[in-house]
Amino acid sequence: MSTIPTTPAHDDTTAARSGRHPVHVAHLVMGLAFLCFTASWALVQGDVVTGRDIRWLLPVPWLVAGAAGLAATAVGSLRRRPEDPATTPDAYDPAEELR
């Protein structure tokens, strides 16, 4: 008998209903950083960027990956927020206690 839980880490039913899968921000950020580093390497090897210009090219992958991570986090948190908290069945109204 195993003591490890066999339930999935995330709920697949919401992904099936919306047609989208959850975005793993860490995978997105590291993938974009790798892509940008590869592009930077290609620019240096192709002699498109030479000399002192290379120092301006090196922080670009981190800036692009960071901006994408922030954007993905912001969009993901907006999608998880309920549209109108007053319409949820568990909405608490302190004015009802005074009546």
Image (tube, grey):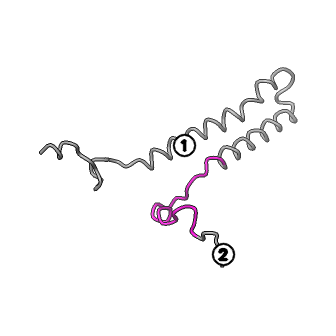
- Residue 7 placement, left or right of 1: left
Question: Residue 55, image x and y in percent?
Answer: 80, 24
Asked whether residue 79 is drawn in magenta, I would say no
- Crowding at dot 1, Cα within 10 Å, few <14 / some 14-19 / many 20+, comes out as some
Residue that protrudes farthest toward the bottom in the picture:
1
Q: Quadrant of residue 7?
A: bottom right
Nearest the eye: 71 or 46: 71
Q: CA distance from mark 1 to mark 2?
A: 35 Å
Question: Residue 30, image x and y in percent?
Answer: 70, 45
Judge whether 89 appears above or below 95 on screen. below
Query: Residue at 75% across / 43% down in the picture?
Result: 34
- Crowding at dot 2, Cα within 10 Å, few <14 / some 14-19 / many 20+, comes out as few
Q: Amino acid at mark 2?
A: Ser
Q: Which residues are magenta?
A: 7-26
Query: Residue at 55% across / 55% down in the picture?
Result: 22
- Residue 31 placement, left or right of 83: right
Nearest the eye: 86 or 30: 86
Q: Give me the disc on residue 20.
A: none
**Residue indicated by mark 1:** 73
- Residue 18 placement, left or right of 30: left
The local secondary structure at tag 1 comes to helix
Counting residues from the start of the chain, the first of labels 1 and 2 encountered is 2
Query: Residue at 79% across / 35% down in the picture?
Result: 40
Q: Amino acid at mark 1?
A: Thr
Question: Residue 93, image x and y in percent?
Answer: 23, 45
Judge whether 77 appears above or below 48 on screen. below
Residue that protrudes farthest toward the left in the picture:
99
**Residue indicated by mark 2:** 2
